[in-house]
Image: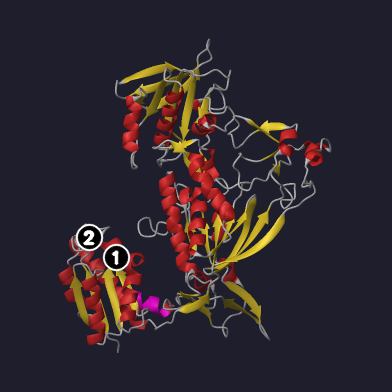
Amino acid sequence: MTNIGVYICHCGTNIAGVVDVEGLTQKVAKLKDVSLAKDYKYMCSEPGQDLIREDIKNRNLDRVVVAACSPRMHENTYKKVLASAGLNPFLLEIANIREQASWVHLDKEKTTDKALDLIKMAVAKVRMDEPLTSLSANVIQRVLVIGAGIAGIQTSLDIANIGFDVVLVEKEQSIGGRMSQLGKTFPTLDCSACILTPKMVEVSLNPRIKLFTYSEVEEISGFIGNFKAKIRKKSRGLDESLCTGCGLCQEKCPTKVPSEYDEKMGKRKAIYTLFPQAVPNIPVIDRASCLYITKGKCGVCKKVCPAGAIDYERTDEFIEEEIGAVVVATGFDPFDPVSKEEYGFGIYRNVITGLQLERLLHAAGPTKGEVVRPSDGAIPKRIAFVQCVGSRDEHANKYCSRVCCMYAIKNALLIKEHHPESEIFIYYIDIRAFGKGYEEFYKRAQENGIKFMRGRVAEIFEEQKSRNPVIRADDTLLGMVTENELDMVVLSVGMIPRSDSSKIQKMLGLAASPDGFFMEAHAKLRPVDTLVDGVFLAGTAQGPKDIPDTVAQAKGAASGALEVISHKTLQLSPLISEVDERLCRGCGDCKDVCEYGAIEIVTLDTHKVARINPAICKGCGACAVACCNGSIKLRNYTDSITFAMLDATLGGAV
């Protein structure tokens, strides 16, 4: 006979507001094998935990049911309570009477009845649960960071400075990410390069950081503490060990093509570095533009290279690295406004994006910091910013990209600083100045004569004679439709997930939220964790954010990774599947449905059987469902336990 204690939480009024907790406790006390039933205002509080702990010791409880909120919130809390009282922590069940009862129903009597059914099922299950022992696995004390923008840089430095090794992989030829494209940052208008470059140099000099640039992670296998990564180090068309970064090859290269880094507002050579402070300062040959590679002509870069570093035949390399945790810091892409035809981007030359304007304003940009019209190179006198392009849009992205209001205000102020006589308009729906000092920054723009026009822009068209862009918009403050002829229009485009994020998502088995960004394990309590153990998120890979929030989350991701690799061994959940090899016929159906690669088919003396890697198995139970002859069981979630739970709530009607 088991000795079960049931503890029912009021959760303030979250549960007690719709559930008759006292009456429920009285009914639960009468259930079979329940020797004790108590309710408490906040069971997860220290007094609530002490209550359970003391009862286990003094009343000899051998099973515990806590009727409260979702197990995602506090199951580990109560497991620790059981362990501290000397009871196996896997002899605990959570009856979720908040999310599954009080939060989704209004009728108190019926909600109380449902809560009773949920507790009955939990009691039936815990009665049949078996005590389990956590599994242990050795930990490789290194971290893989994917992406070397400011998020990846900060994460890597925090981990390396604690004393652990980092493998940092960046897809582009230099670290720095999107922040390196910015001239100044809001709201302080301090130099972006002045903040970023020292950190980039620190990464290159840190002996704990193994840096791979112009490289991509091709495969990741394994599990928390024991991952293996296959990295493709793409060929730069030269020997990196010989290159001195003198720049002579770029200077002499005769081929010029539009620069992706400058958002095609300027040009670069066929052999090039992204920007002057690039780390590493080693160029890359663009194989699609190089005349020697495409036509067998030229070869100037090889002729002039004093170090003899140019090697057109050099191929990609593949490197394998072992790591214990992974941080995904792959960043974002700017929204492409071509799909918003009403704004005329790609049709009218004087309609540009916010990131293109950033490159024009940058002192090392294509115009050395001077804002000019793309059509004729003239300095524009009347400029308008159009907000929420690709954000807060039912036909594009419903979410707010958070930074667009502030970077438009920043760039408007910078233009005013250079040309005080210019007229600047910002067409907005709502100004969202959410950060520290942002509201003051907004007021500063108003005081500097920047005009804020409240209303959504209906369309942008070109004036027939002057060929200037004209904005037609609903002015919701004046209650009228307005038209405004301008010299240049800047579309404040939002952030979207990177185009190649699906590759990382599939490789690591990550979840994505409805907006397409990588999904965190819990929006409030686990904002940098993912549902894959040992994998963490940093920066805008998880969603739109500004630089301070990106750096803060990077530090959080570093902390999460350090929590994994700071241990030489890890305790893994024993709630996994196991195979009865006497019944298994080795058909492989279980292997086909396992999303984690935890199952392999092995050959014994006479037949094939499935084998489960306990360190990789996540206990999802898909294999047990797929097994046609019942040879796979999920520990503490067997068919007999399920039938007992159904019998408990249906009163023997199964």
Figure quadrant of residue 410: top left
Quadrant of the image for the N terminus? bottom left
Percent x, y of residue 415? 45, 25
* Relative to 33, 565 lies left or right: right
Dot 2 corresponds to which residue?
14
Nearer to me, 409 or 202: 202
| Residue farthest toward the top in the current orientation of the protein | 465
* Relative to 30, 65 lies left or right: right
Chain part drawn in magenta? 640-647
Q: Tell me the residue at 49%/78% (across/down).
A: 136
Q: Main secondary structure of the magenta part?
A: helix
Percent x, y of residue 181? 54, 38
Compared to residue 265, the image places residue 437 above or below, namely: below
Dot 1 corresponds to which residue?
69
Mark 2 vs mark 1, CA separation in Å: 9 Å
Nearer to me, 104 or 226: 226
- Whichever of labels 2 and 1 marks the residue nearer the N terminus, that label is 2
Q: Residues within 10 Å of mark 2 (few under 14, many from 20)?
A: some
Nearer to me, 111 or 466: 466
Nearer to me, 302 or 181: 302
